[in-house]
Amino acid sequence: MALKERLFQTLGKLEKAKALLGKVHPVAGMEGLFVVESESQPRKRYLVDLEAETCTCPAYAQGKTRPCKHQVAVVLSLWLREKRRAQVETRAAERPVA
């Protein structure tokens, strides 16, 4: 597969993951585990384990896509949270001391 097609697939998956950002929830007391709500089925949820690099969604289980959009959504969520935290720390460091 040509680079262009592979990148189009990757960007498409990233776009789908962005739509899931508000549906990513860490599992309390379980480092690296996240619940991601289904985009199409309101009561359906998938468990993403970052350490084991797994997801309970059908696409992942069938080997159709790895990483799946749920895994990408979790990592994107963590990356955005870290980016916001770094921005806050930078702003705090730039404030003048009275």
Image (cartoon, helix red, strand yellow):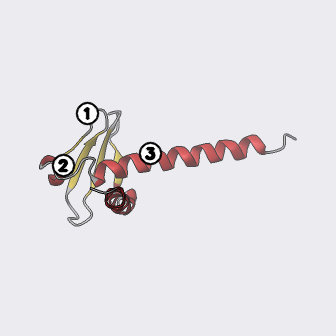
Q: Residue at x 47, y 46 (%)?
A: 79
Q: Could you say whether the residue bearing mark 2 is in a helix, strand or loop?
A: helix
Q: Amino acid at mark 3?
A: Leu
Q: Which residue is mark 3?
A: 78
Whether residue 89 sits left or right of residue 79 in the image: it is: right
Name the quadrant containing residue 34.
top left
Q: Could you say whether the residue bearing mark 3 is in a helix, strand or loop?
A: helix
Numbered circle sitting on residue 60: 2
Q: Nearer the viewer, residue 7 or 36?
A: 7
Whether residue 67 sits left or right of residue 4 in the image: it is: left
Q: Residue at x 36, y 60 (%)?
A: 4
Question: Mark 2 to mark 3: distance in Å?
Answer: 20 Å
Q: Amino acid at mark 2?
A: Tyr
Name the quadrant containing residue 47.
top left
Q: Which residue is mark 1?
A: 52
- Residue at the extreme front of the image, as rendered: 2
Sequence-first disc among 3 and 1:
1
Q: Position of residue 74 (x, y in %)?
A: 36, 48
Sequence-first disc among 2 and 3:
2
Nearer the observer: mark 2 or 3; the answer is: 2
Q: Residue at x 87, y 41 (%)?
A: 98
Q: Position of residue 70 (x, y in %)?
A: 29, 52
Q: Position of residue 33 (x, y in %)?
A: 30, 39
